[in-house]
Amino acid sequence: MRRTGLLLVLAALFAGLAPPSAAGLRVAATTSDLAALARAVGGEAVSVAGLTGGGGDPHHAAARPSMIRTLYGADLLLAVGAELEIGWLPAALRAARNGRILPGAPGHLDLSHSVRLIEKPAGPIDRSMGDVHAEGNPHYLLDPENGRRAARAIAARMAQLDGTNAALYGRNLAGFEAALDARLAQWRARLAPLRGKTAISYHRTFSYLADAFGFRIVGQVEPLPGIAPTAAHLRTLIERIRRERIGLLVMAPYFERRSAALLHDRTGIRVAVLPHSVGATPAAGDYLALFDAIADALTAAR
């Protein structure tokens, strides 16, 4: 109730502000990955603000005054979709009262519609299943080819909203794709030893990464999505790792490390703490550097 009251106050304040200026295309991105793609495609013709940082869990954020102010002034909102932001973005949009970026408006771009989502649950869904995404796994930007698809969609929407700079967006997109192609060859070569191997992950964060580079994630440290591991579940995992000779555990930096350390101590499984987003580690400074850092972490895993 207190948060709802604060949002209503902020909405009243922003409603009284003068309309934002028309200088350049103002882009708000729900995640640091989308912000990085927007900067790569938009270049000097756009200003980009990320609503969340790269170091935390993108499922959970708070509708802060700065976030609402950014949304109020935005011409284009980039969202991951697939319910990743469902816990905070609708409230922030209501408070911002910017019709240009509401769902269905030209200034609202849900990038999940540009890719093929995996791990869609079958049948009815309820809270007993954990934090399940009905539309599919939302961590699709950890496949570089989905980053390409998202960049193309962003360039097309920027050109639609700002036809004056359409040619610039096209050139920037072409440059991004050329750089992506060159780096893809390097990443595939570096991660070739993982092809055909099995791994477990803490959360279902890296399923798209595994698909992209040819290894298989066969289990999770979480017994259910978003549910902390129990002692019984960890014992089962220890037995399975030994039985199936699973050699790698991958996890994002914001998860607790005790469970991974226990699994490593009991089985010898290698643990790779991977940056999950642009900005999650200092080395992951842009979208291409994110995969450089992932390849470094996988190569160095002990």
Image (cartoon, rainbow, N blue to C red):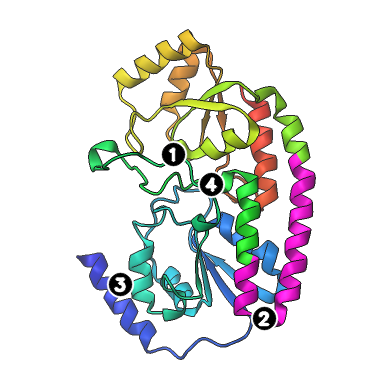
Structural distance between the alpha carbons of marks 3 and 1: 34 Å
* Secondary structure beneath label 4: helix
**Which residue type carries mark 3?**
Leu
Does residue 267 lie above or below 142 as drawn?
above
Within 10 Å of disc 2 (Cα), the crowding (few <14, some 14-19, many 20+) is few
- Marks 3 and 1 close (CB-CB < 8 Å): no
**Which residue type carries mark 2?**
Gly
Query: Counting residues from the N terminus, which is met first, the one under dot 3 or under dot 4?
Result: 3
Which quadrant of the view contains residue 248? Answer: top right
Q: Residue furthest left?
A: 1
* Secondary structure beneath label 3: helix
Q: Position of residue 104 (x, y in %)?
A: 43, 72
Q: Nearer the viewer, residue 48 or 82?
A: 82
**Which residue type carries mark 1?**
Glu
Badge 1 is on which residue? Answer: 119
- Asked whether 176 falls inside the magenta stretch, the response is yes
- Marks 4 and 2 close (CB-CB < 8 Å): no
Query: Residue at horizontal 78%, vertical 52%?
Result: 179
Query: Residue at horizontal 80%, vertical 45%?
Result: 182
Report whether 124 appears left or right of 300.
left
Query: Counting residues from the N terminus, which is met first, the one under dot 3 or under dot 1?
Result: 3
Identify the disc placed on residue 163. 2
Point out the frontmost of discs 3 and 2: 2
Q: Which residues are magenta?
A: 155-184
Query: Counting residues from the N terminus, which is met first, the one under dot 3 or under dot 2?
Result: 3
Badge 3 is on which residue? Answer: 7
Structural distance between the alpha carbons of marks 2 and 1: 37 Å
Structural distance between the alpha carbons of marks 3 and 2: 34 Å
- Marks 4 and 1 close (CB-CB < 8 Å): no
